Amino acid sequence: MTEYDAVAFDFDGTLYSFESIKRPFMWRNWYWAKSLRACLRARQAMRSESFRTPEDMLQFQDDFLMRHLNISAEKARERFEKLMIHRLAAALSPKRQRPGLTDFLDRLLAQNKKLVLISDLPINEKLRTIGLWDYPWSAKVAADDIGVLKPKAAIFETALNEAQVTAAKTIYIGDRVDTDAEGALALGMNFIQMATLSRQKLDDFEKSSWPVFQDFYQVSSYLF
């Protein structure tokens, strides 16, 4: 591993595992299963689009949900915020963090490394409920703030510029190959993938030129 000044993190699926919240989240929101699928499909469709402003991006999402759920634009915006911001945040708590996360963050700070967050979904409410709000993040960039989703370069570049670090001296930790790995590696960042917590499913994660770990104790052992 080359010398680095910062570690950047994806949020969902990285700071916590989806497995840790899937059952309780779906149980509490079973009635909204169709809407949840539509929200996820909308975000995926938005990755290949270019938007002039964040509002243009959200209007694209509104239109997608209007067509697929047969609801008004106002209801579309309200439903996305309800499910993908507020209810997702409500499913989190400090105990949902991936094992070893706060120890890893503390160790990075002790070595004067910068902490960065880059997410395709709004960050702040989830950051509070998962218990990480008080950490000194050098940058927190969400797609909804700038109108760009991963793997497009702009979302990574915005965060790096805000944190005043270079791609070459930043390690990016994420769980997805198509968004996290593709975007980070294209800019020259080192990449670490966070995998499933299930040993039976671990082989499903792509292992090529980057390391794959299940928790932050493993990441800490690798970096330190």
Image (cartoon, rainbow, N blue to C red):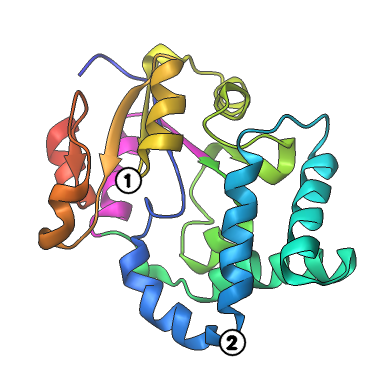
Task: Identify the residue position indicated by label 1 in the image.
Answer: 106
| Disc nearer the start of the sequence (2/1) | 2
Whether residue 35 appears in magenta in the rendering, the answer is no
Looking at the picture, how far across and down is residue 208, in whole percent? 18, 28
**Which sits in the foreground, 146 or 176?**
176
Whether residue 111 appears in magenta in the rendering, the answer is yes
The answer to whether 164 appears left or right of 79 in the picture is left
Q: What residue is shown at x 37% (from left), y 50% (from top)?
A: 14
Q: Is residue 122 visible?
A: no
Residue 63's label in the rendered image is none
The answer to whether 210 appears left or right of 49 in the picture is left
Q: Which residues are magenta?
A: 99-117
Looking at the picture, how far across and down is residue 158, in whole percent? 63, 25
The answer to which image quadrant residue 83 occupies is bottom right
Looking at the picture, how far across and down is residue 47, in whole percent? 60, 37
Callout 1 environment at 10 Å: few (<14), some (14 to 19), or many (20+)? Answer: few
Q: Quadrant of the C terminus?
A: top left
Task: Identify the residue position indicated by label 2 in the image.
Answer: 31
Q: Secondary structure at mark 1?
A: helix
Q: Secondary structure at mark 2?
A: helix
Of badges 2 and 1, the one in the foreground is: 2
Question: In the picture shown, does residue 142 fall above or below 38?
Answer: above
Looking at the picture, how far across and down is residue 115, in whole percent? 45, 36
Count of numbered labels shown in the rendering: 2
Q: What residue is shown at x 73% (from left), y 35% (from top)?
A: 146
The answer to whether 93 appears left or right of 30 in the picture is left
Q: What amino acid is at disc 2?
A: Tyr
Q: What amino acid is at disc 1?
A: Asp
Kindly check if marks 2 and 1 are in contact, taking CB atoms under 8 A apart as contact. Answer: no
